[in-house]
Amino acid sequence: NAGVMQNPRHLVRRRGQEARLRCSPMKGHSHVYWYRQLPEEGLKFMVYLQKENIIDESGMPKERFSAEFPKEGPSILRIQQVVRGDSAAYFCASSPSGISGNTIYFGEGSWLTVV
Amino acid sequence: TQLLEQSPQFLSIQEGENLTVYCNSSSVFSSLQWYRQEPGEGPVLLVTVVTGGEVKKLKRLTFQFGDARKDSSLHITAAQPGDTGLYLCAYGSSNTGKLIFGQGTTLQVKP
């Protein structure tokens, strides 16, 4: 089985542009999580989605950030009007269910650089 | 949200040395997980500890869960350059399965 696939791996955007990060979960996984990691820091939870539903977006900034996981296609994390502080690695993870204790599998990340 | 404090934040040692990294909290957890993240990659699960006092071994890595289930440690014996990376502890939310991570310990093992 292919693992969690993220693209693009690296993205450069100018301040004010939009960034779209995509995540295809592992086959058979219907639960997707997005995390953000600043340099030399741990991962910070952003949002948890199931197909067509946002379950927990408590870690998502209230403005400019949105996420979706449509019935068909990958999950997308969208950042509008990017600022330099958005520069970070964004990791997607998936699991077969949302039960604590289930192993979740991480993608290799998308590195966003805002210039 | 309960906090996980990891120490030390950075560690640079020579190949062959032993080391221990710690993950502490004032809260009780049903389980804790340890991940390793190499540069440019996503975190990879190393182990899950569930029972207070539990010890798990993974080759040269020894993981321990505190008796009170508030803390955990990772001990590496005879470290190798391939052990270099960011070591993260995390706990899972019982409701959603989301993970809350500590800030990590960056380990550098010099040949």
Image (cartoon, coloured by chain):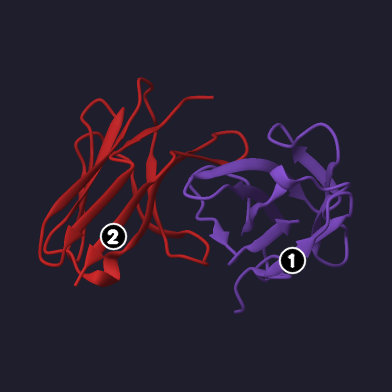
Residue pictured at 60% horizontal, 73% vertical: A3
Report x, y in % for residue B82. 28, 71
Residue pictured at 49% horizontal, 45% vertical: A42
Residue A11's tag is 1
Would you name the residue on which mark 2 appears? Answer: B108
* Left/right of residue B59 with respect to residue A84 in the rendered view: left
Chain to which mark 1 belongs: A
- Tally the marks: 2
Q: Amino acid at mark 2?
A: Gln
Of all residues shown, which one is farthest toward the bottom?
A: A1
Q: Quadrant of the N terminus of chain A?
A: bottom right
Report x, y in % for residue B87. 36, 52
Q: Amino acid at mark 1?
A: Leu
Q: Quadrant of the C terminus of chain A?
A: bottom right
Residue pictured at 15% horizontal, 67% vertical: B15
* Left/right of residue B36 with respect to residue B76 in the rendered view: right
* Residue B78 figure quarter: bottom left
| Distance of label 1 from label 2 (alpha carbons) | 28 Å
Chain to which mark 2 belongs: B
Q: Residues within 10 Å of mark 2 (few under 14, many from 20)?
A: many
- Please say whether residue A22 is visible from this viewpoint: no
Report x, y in % for residue B42. 52, 62
User: SS class of the residue under badge 1?
Assistant: strand
Report x, y in % for residue B66. 22, 33
Q: Give the drawing colour for chain A.
A: purple
* Left/right of residue B9 with respect to residue A109 in the rendered view: left
Q: Residues within 10 Å of mark 1 (few under 14, many from 20)?
A: some
Relative height, residue B27 to residue A33 (above, below): above
* Residue B94 figure quarter: top right
From the rendered image, report the letter of the chain displayed in red.
Answer: B
